[in-house]
Amino acid sequence: MEKTLDLKYTYTEKKDTRSGFGDGLLEAGRKNPNVVGLCADLIGSLKMGAFQKEFPERFFQVGIAEANMIGLAAGMTIGGKIPFTGTFANFSTGRVYDQIRQSVAYSEKNVKICASHAGLTLGEDGATHQILEDVGMMKMLPNMTVIVPCDYNQTKAATLALVDHHGPAYLRFGRPSWPIFTAADQKFEIGKAIKMIEGTDVTIFATGHLVWEAIVAEAMLREEGISAEVINIHTIKPLDEAAILESVTKTGCAVSAEEHQVNGGLGDSIAQLLTRNHPAPLEYVGVNDAFGESGTPTQLLEKYGLNADNIVKAAKKSIGRK
Amino acid sequence: METQSIDQLKKICSQVRRDCLRMVHAVQSGHPGAALGLTEYFVALYFKEMEHNNSFDIDGKGEDLFFLSNGHVSALWYSVLARTGYFSTDELGTFRKINSRLQGHPATEEGLPGVRIASGSLGQGLSVAIGAAQAKKLNQDDRVVYVMMGDGEQQEGQIWEAAMYAAHYKIDNLIAAVDYNGQQIDGPTEKVMDLLNLRAKYEAFGWEVIDIKKGNEIESVLEGLTKAKSLIGKGKPVLILLYTEMGYGVDFMVGTHKWHGVAPNDEQLENALGQLEETLGDY
């Protein structure tokens, strides 16, 4: 389907976003001697092996003990270290929420919580591991920055940007091989949305893997004569309110697209913003109060209504409500 | 800090106990029991054993660090911090009140000197202290990290995750202590959830364990801390089992969990203060 479409972005390579994290962390380690890595028995899955190999004295395998990992990381900041913790998104958030809340967020510690295998695209492991609530939990915490990059290059750039950002942060990425469509040399500004495609009829605000689905959806909508604007919201908190309001003021309606529960996700943040400042139709593409299941990423995105087809439907519905 | 004599330390303990009771009484809330029980240990650390700068720097490079995991003992910590000069003793009067830096449980948000991380939700401080000790090793900083925990707190699973890590990574610049008073909110620890042989548990986790059998005698505490320090740098984390009596120093509060989280009324305060000499001047 994609090949027949006139896509505004193309790709020659697919790669997992977690590899963007792993490569970014290695580069971060070379740039800054205070960067340390911690991992809870998932070095291969988190792609932290290269960092471990090059900086063995700055890497700490903590075993299957995520609560301790968060506490250790908070403690290491006292003394100037910049800890990057790595485990699956489920074990990075829900399992250790109280540790993050007290020892990291409330205490304003410079810990970077790096979370892989987020969302449905984890695939066959099923719902126990497919966390869809993590962004909501993290964005509710005062002092916490929440970043969900969309491809390998953006994940690498985000990882590097976090080194120079002082404060607690949550970086969410995933497992599947995914199109690389953003620039390798991109400048990553935390809190700054990126307008991917200009449009006039509807704005699609997408984050993470679904930015690619939004790119595909834009081409599908264009074939039907609908002009969609696509904005990549890589930073969910702090939200780029100015960019969102400017776009919706122009297009008059919006769609949010994310690999997360509709409750508490990016769409909720956009809805709050629009309600307070510029009421406009908003349709949500996300998981609707359900757990996931085993399957391939493509099957799961289709079954739970998260692919380009669903974004197209949501865009038309949003336009129809203007 | 000039070296304090045993007699001076005892006088400081009396004043600190007065501070704790007056602070808790003023807001009719807080946790006097463990504060009274841990007074000798805190006074020994801050007035004699620790090398620390009163010009507070959160990174604490080149100085000993202290972390309080059982954050409900906050009144005691605040009193000792103020009495060692981290901030004015006048501020003790703001304890637990609106717009105060002296939160019910310790916090960093308003930048209270001496506090490096929030605590209160139990089980987290040991991990944090080990992380800080690990950072000291990375920084080639040979000072020591101290951490205080409750005995009821040993029921938290995270404690044992941390205990495992500390031995595995040979965190031998750490002196952890358990306030071994045998009491927790709902009653004696042996009834609520028996800790059984805590010494054997830590030893099995690879720690060096020492006892301070008389945790409410300053001489005994100093002796125990000297012994603990002698074990620094020997490849193992060090744990002190600090035998204390909850509510020590006030006859009607001692040895019971009933004063864990209850403030004395006016009459009880007067009675208690009558048993504790005012040595450094009330705040």
Image: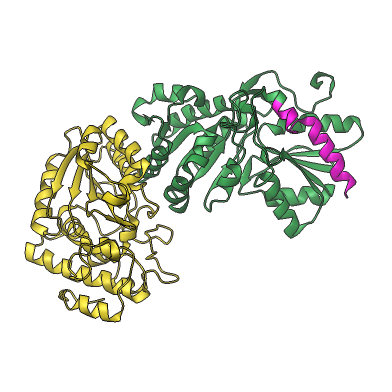
Chain colours: A green, B yellow
x and y, in percent, of residue B165 in the image = 31, 34
B89 versus B230 height, above or below: below
Quarter of the picture holding the N terminus of chain B = bottom left
The foreground one among A56 and B120 is: B120
- Please give the name of the residue rendered at 8% of the width and 57% of the height, measured from the top-left corner: B219
Majority SS type along the magenta span? helix
- Please give the name of the residue rendered at 12% of the width and 64% of the height, measured from the top-left corner: B9
A223 versus B155 height, above or below: above
Left or right: residue A214 compared with residue B200: right
Residue A74 image-quadrant placement: top left
Q: Residue furthest right?
A: A225
B268 versus A318 height, above or below: below
x and y, in percent, of residue B6 in the image = 7, 62
Is B220 contained in the magenta span? no
* Residue B150 visible in the snapshot: no
Left or right: residue A104 compared with residue B182: right
Left or right: residue B164 compared with residue A156: left
- Please give the name of the residue rendered at 36% of the width and 73% of the height, measured from the top-left corner: B28
The foreground one among B270 and A102 is: B270
B215 versus A290 height, above or below: below
- Please give the name of the residue rendered at 13% of the width and 69% of the height, measured from the top-left corner: B11
* Residue B200 visible in the snapshot: yes
x and y, in percent, of residue A85 in the image = 45, 35
The foreground one among A175 and A131 is: A131
The residue stretch that appears in magenta: A300-322
